[in-house]
């Protein structure tokens, strides 16, 4: 029996167990409890099979022809969605790279990269073929598309505003089936395998979904007999399985409802109020600037401008850091410029929103914020205006907020 058939079989068994539970065939409490343990065990079985399914065939990287695109720029965004929702139209609008769009499904067959120039940063955007229900199990090009999604920093789930709301759930399920977790944080469960000592099970709060017996059973399913488990929140069986599997990818996702030009204003209003959603129309160029701003926010990008001593800051090319990836402390900033810089650094002078006063003397652990200006002061180098005095403001940049805002990206 193939892995897919095995998964189908277990899913059927789960459905039967759930139905028995719901229809009240199991009137005794003990039987109901057994039902819970049985379901937990089945869930672990499916998770194991899905992991097997995801292992790429020997000698391949998992992506595949036409899908291996080199990373470029300060972040990567993947466009995921059903066929003909307007992914290629959106890429063409935002990046200026042409990606074929047409009214028939599966117009796009490979991964098409484009670059968005926004806030002096470069963001790589990837157009991908449409995916369909069953993609996670290998239907269409689902597996390749999902592999690319995993390699990105942000997923834009593009949806057709005029189609069923159910599409969002179907796609989310497909992505979850391959280990992607959208807009969730990792479960607060400490888990460590041990060589000996059996299983120690503890919690710092009351647990309503998982008890010691169920936890043992799940671990048994994974043939784990020695481990330390500490629940720091009232997590579910699915959370526990995620932690044991350890290969889950927690990603940010923005739901982009396109084609709002063909629906009524009440429906637009309703969609716009959904969590993590942005409504747009590529055809009418509606709200694309809002989408860009949202992408920027979600990617946690931070621009830092350098100011050479005695000169105006260089506002043409910032160092772009990310709060999510790599961090944005002064140390991260220095490493970005040169690896040896940290050793030579005495302190930095900071102007901008992260500074309490202008300029603030800061050390390596100081967290920089978007649009800060930084002057590096190396050891054995005299700062401008004399040490510890702040009178030399002649060369300080004008207030950041005063400086001319550059024109936003063409949309
Ligand atoms: N009404 C309307 N139609 C749009 C809009 N954006 C795109 N379309 C149309 O939707 C159709 C599909 O657009 P594509 O960009 O090819 O969609 P896709 O998601 O890339 O499709 P596949 O590559 O086949 O998965 C085209 O006929 C577009 O002109 C929009 O904002 N409003
Ligand atoms: K299309
Ligand atoms: Mg397309």
Image: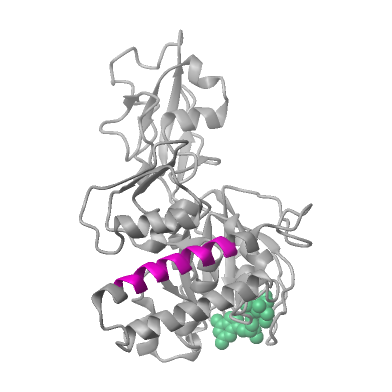
| Above or below, comparing residue 351 to residue 47 in the picture | above
Residue located at (43% from left, 38% from top):
328
Where residue 109 sits, quadrant-wise, is: bottom right
Residue 67 x, y percent position in the rendering: 73, 61
Query: Does 289 appear in magenta?
Result: no
Residue 112 versus residue 4: which sits nearer the camera?
4
* Quadrant of the image where one finds ligand 2: bottom right
Q: Is residue 340 above or below residue 93?
A: above
Q: Which residues are magenta?
A: 33-50
Quadrant assignment, res 207:
bottom left
Picture mark count: 0
Reply yes or no: does residue 34 show up in magenta: yes
x and y percentages locating residue 195 in the rendered image: 47, 36
Quadrant where the image shows the C terminus: bottom right
Q: Position of residue 184 (x, y in %)?
A: 40, 60
Question: Where 97 sits versus 21, above or below?
Answer: above
- Residue 138 seen by the camera: yes
Colour convention: one colour
Left or right of 146, for residue 15: left
Looking at the image, which residue is at 50% across and 15% down?
344
Instruction: Compare residues 307 and 149 and report the one nearer the observer.
Output: 149
Q: Give residue 3's position: percent from left, percent from top.
A: 65, 69
Q: 235 or 113: nearer the eye?
A: 235
Name the residue: 70% across, 83% down. Answer: 102
Q: Is residue 62 left or right of residue 319?
A: right
Q: What's the residue at 38%, 62% (across, down)?
A: 237
Camera-side residue: 225 or 266? Answer: 225
Give the main secondary structure, helix, strand or loop, of the magenta stretch.
Answer: helix
């Amino acid at each position: 029996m193939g892995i897919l058939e095995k998964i189908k079989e277990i899913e059927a068994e789960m459905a039967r167990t759930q139905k028995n539970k719901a229809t009240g065939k199991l009137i005794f409490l003990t039987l109901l409890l057994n039902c819970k343990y049985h379901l937990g065990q089945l869930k672990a079985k499916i998770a194991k099979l899905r992991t097997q399914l995801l292992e790429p065939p020997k000698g391949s990287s998992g992506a595949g022809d036409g899908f291996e695109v080199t990373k470029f720029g300060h972040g990567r965004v993947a466009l995921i969605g059903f066929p003909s929702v307007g992914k290629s139209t959106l890429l063409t609008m935002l990046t200026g790279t042409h990606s074929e769009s047409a009214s028939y499904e599966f117009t796009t067959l490979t991964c098409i990269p484009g670059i968005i120039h926004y806030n002096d940063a470069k963001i790589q955007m990837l157009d991908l073929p449409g995916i369909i229900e069953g993609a996670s199990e290998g239907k269409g090009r689902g597996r390749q598309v999902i592999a690319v999604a995993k390699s990105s920093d942000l997923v834009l789930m593009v949806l057709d505003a005029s189609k069923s709301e159910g599409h969002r759930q179907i796609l989310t399920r497909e992505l979850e089936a391959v280990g992607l977790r959208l807009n969730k944080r990792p479960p607060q469960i400490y888990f460590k395998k041990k060589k000996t000592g059996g299983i120690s099970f503890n919690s710092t709060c009351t647990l309503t979904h998982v008890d010691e017996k169920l936890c043992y059973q799940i671990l048994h399913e994974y043939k784990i007999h020695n481990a330390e488990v500490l629940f720091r929140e009232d997590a579910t069986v699915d959370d526990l399985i995620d932690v044991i599997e350890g290969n889950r990818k927690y990603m940010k996702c923005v739901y982009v409802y396109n084609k709002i030009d063909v629906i009524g204003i009440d429906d637009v209003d309703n969609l716009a109020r959904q969590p993590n959603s942005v409504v747009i129309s590529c055809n009418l160029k509606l709200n694309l600037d809002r989408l860009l701003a949202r992408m920027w926010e979600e990617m946690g990008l931070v621009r830092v401008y350098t100011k050479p001593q005695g000169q105006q800051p260089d506002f043409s090319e910032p160092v772009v850091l990310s709060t999510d990836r790599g961090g944005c402390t002064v140390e991260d900033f220095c490493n970005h410029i040169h690896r040896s810089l940290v050793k030579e650094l005495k302190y930095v002078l900071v102007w901008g929103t992260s500074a309490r006063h202008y300029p603030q003397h800061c050390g390596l652990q100081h967290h920089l914020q978007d649009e800060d200006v930084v002057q590096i002061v190396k050891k054995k180098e005299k700062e401008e205006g004399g040490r510890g005095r702040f009178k030399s403001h002649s060369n300080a940049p004008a207030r950041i907020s005063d400086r001319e805002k550059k024109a936003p990206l063409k949309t």
